[in-house]
Amino acid sequence: MMRSMLLGALLVLSVSGCDWIKSGGKPDAAPPTELVEFAPTVGVSQVWTRKLGSGVGKAGLKLRATYDDGRIFSSDASGAVLAFDATSGAQTWRVELGDPVSSSPGAGDGLVVVGGINGTVVALDAASGTQRWTAAASSEVLAPPAVGAGVVVVRAIDGRIFGFDAADGTRRWVFDRGVPLLSLRGNGPPLIADGVVFAGYDNGKIVALTLSDGALRWEQTLAQSEGRTELERMVDIDGELAKNGDELFAASYRGQVGALAPENGRILWTRDFSGYAGVSLAGDKLLVVDDGGAVQALDVRSGASVWKQEGLLRRWPGTPVAVGNYAVVGDFEGYLHWLSLEDGSFVARQRQGKDGIRAAPLVIGDVVYTTSADGGLSAWRVGG
């Protein structure tokens, strides 16, 4: 009963709730850093913008767009799934599922797949939006499903990962790992690469599963849970993982950021770090944001600091991503910030709206797609 009560409390935490956790419950936490004006050195234009629906409200969801075969796919918490032409923003279809959606869409193999608060998984035809099949996970689905090689991988909030047949939704396998008594609201999306599913857990561990049957290939601890209280022992890996040819990267809350060997999970390097978001690659740099809101670039081979930008402290920036020679990241007031990949300096800023941009931007070519908490989807281009 106690575990259910605590988990329920965590499920309703929004971004401000996570701030309360990180401040130790202290009401006098420092306010967000005020943005400093600067002279932009690059021009950024909004290519198009669309309204998806009512947004996520107080659900604390981090909905983002995904891309496949020339289309941008998005979801709204009210139950809508939408497809747009990536270039023009023209809507190609919209489907109302009738039940709330809690995950961003995953796309691949001609499908668009979303999960719901009751564990329902719905697969739609990517070209038309026609429903292809439904399946059931064991609990709420917060992470976007991953699709590849005929398998749809869905992660449930209770720690189970499911593999469904992409053709008809038949369950092929399930991998079960328990979750800690207390954790941040959210799950990192599963990552499919080279026939393997990689996933980070709320206990600070990373697992690698065979895509075809869900068999455990290896399990590695990135962050060790320590402390006298459940709050102190939180070591969630809640954000995106990243992989290049021979390294897998991840970051945890109250733990480590590091690189692992994808074939066996061997630790290549780690450094002390605490972050609530994910990691992304920018050539020879790893982009991260710490739990104070500082955006950082690390050397991918050693983890050494390349630069650190503290102009967004306590503004809840999400996962930064690279676009050309810049990193772009959103904050809790709906601002998008472009930073130089060379030294982390601000080069441009735009505001999508008054509500926050909680999820990592999606970058396709030279265009950045961002989703705001109030249900807006926008496309941006540097110099466009």
Image (cartoon, rainbow, N blue to C red):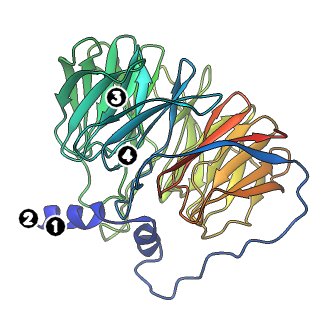
**What residue do we see at 78% from left, 43% from top?**
326
Q: Which residue is mark 3?
A: 113
User: How many marks do you count on the picture?
Assistant: 4
Work out whether residue 10 or residue 379 is closer to the camera in this orientation and state it: 379
**Image spot of residue 142 (x, y percent):** 33, 45
**What residue do we see at 75% from left, 60% from top?**
309
Q: Tell which circle, 4 or 2, labels the residue nearer the N-terminal end.
A: 2
Q: Which residue is mark 1?
A: 5
Q: Would you call the spot at circle 4 few (<14 residues within 10 Å), some (14-19), or many (20 or more)?
A: many
Q: Which residue is mark 4?
A: 187
**Image spot of residue 352 (x, y percent):** 63, 56
Q: Are marks 1 and 2 in contact (CB under 8 Å)?
A: yes
Question: What amino acid type is highlighted by mark number 4?
Answer: Asn
Question: What amino acid type is highlighted by mark number 3?
Answer: Val
Q: Which residue is mark 2?
A: 1
Question: What amino acid type is highlighted by mark number 1?
Answer: Met
